[in-house]
Amino acid sequence: MPTFTAPVKDMQFILHDVLKTSEQDVTGYDDLDRDFTAAILEEAGKLASEVFAPLNAVGDSQGVTLENGVVRTPEGFKEAFERFREGGWAGLDCDPDYGGQGLPYLLSTATGEIFSSSNMAFMMYPGLTHGAYSAIHAHGTDAQKQTYLPKMVSCEWTGTMNLTEPHCGTDLGLMRTRAEPQDDGSYAITGQKIFISAGDHDMSENVIHLVLAKIPGGPEGIKGVSLFIVPKFLVKDDNTPGDRNAVSVGKVEEKMGIHGNATCVMNYDGATGYLLGEEHKGMRAMFTMMNEARLGVAMQGLSQATVAYENALAYAKDRLQGRAVTGAENPDGPADPLIVHPDIRRSLMDQKSFVEGARAFGLWSASLIDRSHRMGDDQAEGLVSLMTPVLKGFLTDQGFDMTVLAQQIYGGHGYIEEWGMSQFTRDARIAMIYEGANGIQALDLVGRKLAAQGGKPAMAFFEEIKGFIKENSDDEDLKANFMDPLKTASKQLQEAAMFFMQNGMKNPNEALSGSYDFMHLFGHVCLGYMWARMAVVAKAALAAGAEDRDFYDTKLATGRYYMARRLPACAMHVARITSGAETVMALDAANF
């Protein structure tokens, strides 16, 4: 069975050496010294490895069951959820006014990666709850906040988001769920929602559903959508669960992966709901939840790549197979370990360079969110908004690919369930689909985010990279191995963006046909930037006589690999983009 050990040392390197967290002027960051973050991350790692990780295979094999209208979670999940609640992990970055600890989102992102690596399906229950908490916190009335948030912060009550219907997914303007106004100010919610993660379960006293629906007489399409709070159990005056609401689970889906999470069909039969935010402004409120969820899903892609790589590396060191072409490296044994072979090394380096670069990208982005929310920094807000589709699309696509590479190292054993590697691949697959399929992320990036604010965030990103390269080009090694490749990749990204500007207005297909490549091009540049930043820090540490020279030497070697072997993919992506739409759109539908 796979194991998991939290990458605390690497996280500490990113938080303190690269991001210099405790030195930033962001409110609350001065408390995040090395000892404090180490204590938090190590405790999270202990819970993850000892409690959550052993349940990962259990959840995969047992799944969830629907019994008499109640969803039963896999064996051990309820006890693990109680441990999670008791530790206060659910409210780590939540508002202290409602029982949260008020710590920065950055720290919650780091612990979230650890927990998701150990058991992604399990962590979706509190993950969806946090998103629902954020939406109510941002858009709810004082009374709604007082009613729901304390119990959601503690995870005594959990939350969901209900968007998709059988006939519409991305095109939410087609939804049919309706909300009829009632005399008491509530609404009667009627309709069916599908693919509702954590839609029902036996681990909390109540489930607070956030449901998109249309109020009769409102505008057509997406402009007529409102958001409602619909509790599983109506809440009594003393804030305890009361009568069962008219909401039920019609079915629990059988899925490719994340078997331990209940993906439900939810039926609303005149259920009592309460408007969250303004009438017909439901998407504004829901996007508070969705944007947070998209970063969370990006980290899911990273998390599955992380745990898959960790186990593949251990297998490659242990499994004896063949001899090194340059001569036996294990002469006393019948064969050499897999890791001596160049192609195995290539695969492991692909995984390692992605995982560590993506972790830096995710934590850097979380720091931008903190800067935006805690400091009102508009530039940080614009930059993280630009990065959100890149994070979600690139990290989940690449994260899935890395789980496949890890599985491949096991050969036939990777295809056998007892080794557990297929679960990482199956679980990672959903991250490319939910919270906006990655094709939609690419369209959002090119169609909306790139030109947002007149292109100001994109230009700020290009200038940031340009300034960084200029500051760090005196060192010949850094220049040749990091700054020059990053400069080339950044120019290729700008070339692609210019192609869209020059051609997209005349023919939108010219831009949209290249949007997916652009998302990956952007992602590679972001990871290249992260690796260049880490290389600067590693070189400085070595020059200062750092004790752990192996760690910093390894960072530099891994970074050089990414810049030499992964970043050149940018040339391929820009070539595809600038080839235009003609070949993509050439066939009539009947000729496919």
Image (cartoon, rainbow, N blue to C red):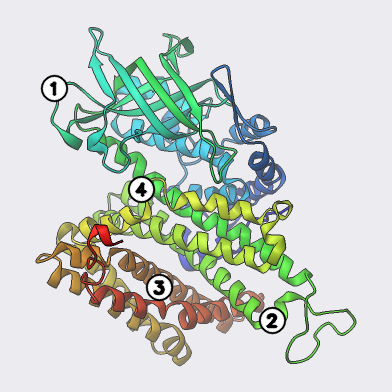
Query: Which type of secondary structure does the marked residue at label 4 adopt?
Result: loop
Q: Secondary structure at mark 2?
A: loop
As drawn, the label of residue 217 is: 1
Residue 125 percent across, percent down from the top left: 52, 35
**Residue 246 location in percent, x, y?**
40, 14
- Check disc 3 and report the residue beneath it: 529
In 3D space, how far apart are the residues under numbered discs 2 and 1 (Cα atoms)? 67 Å
Residue 391 in picture, x, y percent from top left: 39, 58
- Measure the alpha-carbon separation of dots 4 and 2: 39 Å
| Res 281 quadrant in image | top left
Residue 438, can we see it?
Answer: yes
Residues 51 and 547: in front is 51
**Sequence order check, earlier mark of 4 and 1:** 1
Q: Residues within 10 Å of mark 2 (few under 14, many from 20)?
A: some
Residue 528 is tagged as: none
Amino acid marked by disc 3: Tyr
Spatial CA distance of label 4 from label 3 is: 26 Å
What amino acid is at disc 2?
A: His
**x 72%, y 61%: residue:** 413
Asked whether the residues under the numbered discs 4 and 1 touch, taking CB atoms below 8 Å apart as contact, a structural biologist would say no
Q: Nearer the viewer, mark 3 or mark 1?
A: 1
Is residue 110 at least partly visible in the picture? no
Which residue is located at x 24 percent, y 54 percent? 378
> Looking at the image, which is closer to me, 591 or 379?
591
Residue for badge 2 = 341
